Amino acid sequence: MISLSVNISEAQKSYPINIEWDSISSMREKILSYVQGKKFLVVISEKVEKLYGKELGFTKEEKFILKDGEKQKNFKNYEKILNLALKMQLTRKDAIIAIGGGVVGDLAGFAASTYMRGIDFIQVPTTLLACVDSSVGGKTGIDTKFGKNLVGVFYQPKAVLINTNFLKTLDERQLKTGLGEVVKYAFIEKSCMNNEEFNLTNFISENCEKILNKDNLTLSSLIQMCIKLKISVVEKDEKENGLRRILNFGHTYGHAIEQITGYKKFTHGEAVVEGIHFAFNLAVKKNLIDKNYKYFADDVMKKFNFRAIPQFPLNKIIELMKMDKKATSDKIVFILPTDYSIVKAFEISEEELIS
Ligand code: GLY
């Protein structure tokens, strides 16, 4: 088992992140060792329940089974979870446990953060995307009809427990959506200000076959490196006032792609990869990097053969990017590469983008 620790000084909270590959049936005991009280509520994805429900061994009464899909991250389910916690009479010592992907983690985490003004929350991410991104760093929330993640709080979990055996049943597309975030870390590595140097672009290039074959040890090393980079960033800037913005590399354009296609056609990772290509092209046009670095980045991304995304009318994309949470009144914030694995934030006007 690999054990990492996160220290968020602003929230005066530190918590462990364990990465292991033991049998899934050992998870129940490990999860419950982090529950202080006598009671807990498990919020579990329907898919994970079907595949691993028996092995995990939680009873029907202990579980809230959440249907799959981003649409489920809504006020109704938030209320249902709170009502169930109230019915179960969870106290402040008890806990809410999320077992699933990012939707489950964000929704259950938000419920935990507001139930009785905040009870313990344990994350058990079961997708690669949730392992390397959403389960770490404390972003929780729900979607509204006005947009994604517009209601939520920063609320750090009590523990994050990763078991790479959950990833064995991910289909190729689900695995690759996580890999979209993985390549993001590779291109921002040096800006994360982590003490250790990984050279993630090399690791990806050298191990792409093993990663795609879901080799337990390779996936564990990969997840460990991505999480260490994320920890380094969120420990320095929990609330995204500065450094944490670099985690949005590829996301300004990527979110617009997701929005324009109704969050249905492309996965988050596919859209982020397209956003990374857009950022590299923009950086070349602005003379921030030379073309060879862009070609190198293209080659790294080609290793995973991500789904190609067609070009959308730039004016429509710009309209959507202007609505981004990070946009200022008339400029759009882009995280762009400036050197090998280094990125910086730039505010770019609509006129400059069009030209
Ligand atoms: N997903 C980006 C972040 O956690 O800040």
Image: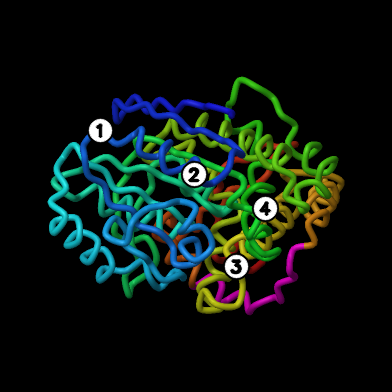
Residue located 38% across and 55% down the image: 106
Q: Which of the two discs, 3 and 2, labels the residue nearer the N terminus?
A: 2
**Disc number lying in front (4 or 1):** 1
Which of the pair 127/289 is nearer the observer? 127
Which residues lie in the magenta part?
Answer: 306-319
What amino acid is at disc 2? Arg
Which of the pair 154/294 is nearer the observer? 154
Q: Is mark 1 within 8 Å of ligand 1?
A: no
Q: Which residue is mark 4?
A: 179
**Disc number lying in front (4 or 2):** 4
Which numbered disc covers residue 267?
3
Could you give the CA–CA distance between mark 3 and mark 2, rounded to whole angstroms?
A: 21 Å
Mark 3 is surrounded, within 10 Å at the Cα level, by few (under 14), some (14 to 19) or many (20 or more) other residues, namely: some
Could you give the CA–CA distance between mark 4 and mark 2, rounded to whole angstroms?
A: 19 Å
Residue located 68% across and 59% down the image: 176
Element type where label 1 sits in the image: loop
Mark 2 is surrounded, within 10 Å at the Cα level, by few (under 14), some (14 to 19) or many (20 or more) other residues, namely: some
Could you give the CA–CA distance between mark 1 and mark 3, rounded to whole angstroms?
A: 37 Å
Which of the pair 255/55 is nearer the observer? 55
**Disc number lying in front (2 or 1):** 1
Query: Magenta segment: does it hold 310?
Result: yes
What amino acid is at disc 4? Leu
